[in-house]
């Protein structure tokens, strides 16, 4: 089954309800990139009138995670996937709509091939950059992922 934006947003509702109710949504999903968004709302605010950092992290992780899931699914093998680390930089107050983009699809594909050849776990880092409506960079995230073919 082909993974679509609509299917994944439904998946968020049922499997990641906290992200769904905070307004995190997938906007675009291609083979090599994914875009997730979140808009400042009452439910995802912090005391400083901007989006709470954990909500930004959910949107950023979604942009990397959808690519990992899409590409592992396309490989026709069953994979275990897990976030094993995260690093973040917050550069500007997050208000309005923030879009997180991960364009590391080619890198994921290489790691999938490595996992298939070695039959061992492979760890790698994916980047997601968040920009606001005016195009200013708000945050940068790096998520360390681990994938392994299920026995």
Image: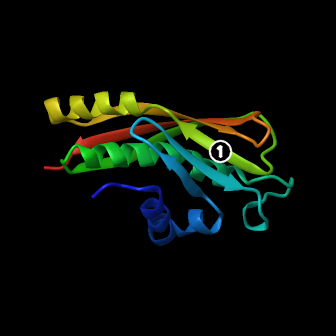
Please tell me whether residue 111 is drawn above or below residue 31 in the rendered image: above
Tell me where residue 103 appears, x and y as whole percent.
49, 33
Viewer-closest of 3 and 21: 3
Viewer-closest of 10 and 59: 10
Tell me where residue 40 appears, x and y as whole percent.
76, 57
Q: Would residue 88 be visible to someone looking at this image?
A: no
52 left or right, relative to 61: right
Dot 1: element = strand
Image-quadrant location for residue 32: top left
Tell me where residue 21 appears, x and y as whole percent.
62, 69
117 left or right, relative to 146: left
33 left or right, relative to 51: left
As drawn, which residue projects farthest toward the bottom?
14
Q: Residues within 10 Å of mark 1 (few under 14, many from 20)?
A: many
As drawn, which residue projects farthest toward the right?
48
Which residue is depicted at the point 70% across and 47% down? 98
User: Which residue position holds label 1?
Assistant: 99
Viewer-closest of 58 and 29: 29
Please tell me whether residue 88 is drawn above or below residue 48 in the rendered image: above
Please tell me whether residue 20 is drawn above or below residue 128 in the rendered image: below
Q: Quadrant of the N terminus?
A: bottom left
Tell me where residue 146 appears, x and y as whole percent.
34, 40
Which residue is depicted at the point 36% across and 49% down? 69
């Amino acid at each position: 089954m082909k993974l679509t934006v609509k299917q994944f947003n439904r998946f968020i509702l049922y499997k990641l309800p906290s992200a769904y109710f905070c307004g995190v949504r997938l906007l675009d999903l291609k083979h090599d990139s994914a875009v997730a968004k979140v808009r400042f709302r009452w439910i995802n605010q912090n005391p400083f009138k901007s989006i709470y950092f954990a909500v930004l992290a959910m949107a950023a992780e979604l942009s990397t995670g959808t690519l990992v899931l899409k590409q592992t699914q396309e490989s026709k093998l069953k994979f275990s996937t897990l976030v094993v680390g995260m690093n973040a930089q917050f550069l500007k107050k997050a208000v309005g709509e923030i879009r997180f983009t991960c364009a590391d699809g080619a890198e994921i594909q290489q790691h999938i091939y490595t996992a298939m050849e070695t039959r061992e776990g492979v760890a790698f880092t994916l980047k997601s950059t968040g920009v606001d409506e005016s195009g200013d960079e708000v945050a940068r995230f790096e998520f360390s992922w681990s994938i392994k073919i299920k026995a």
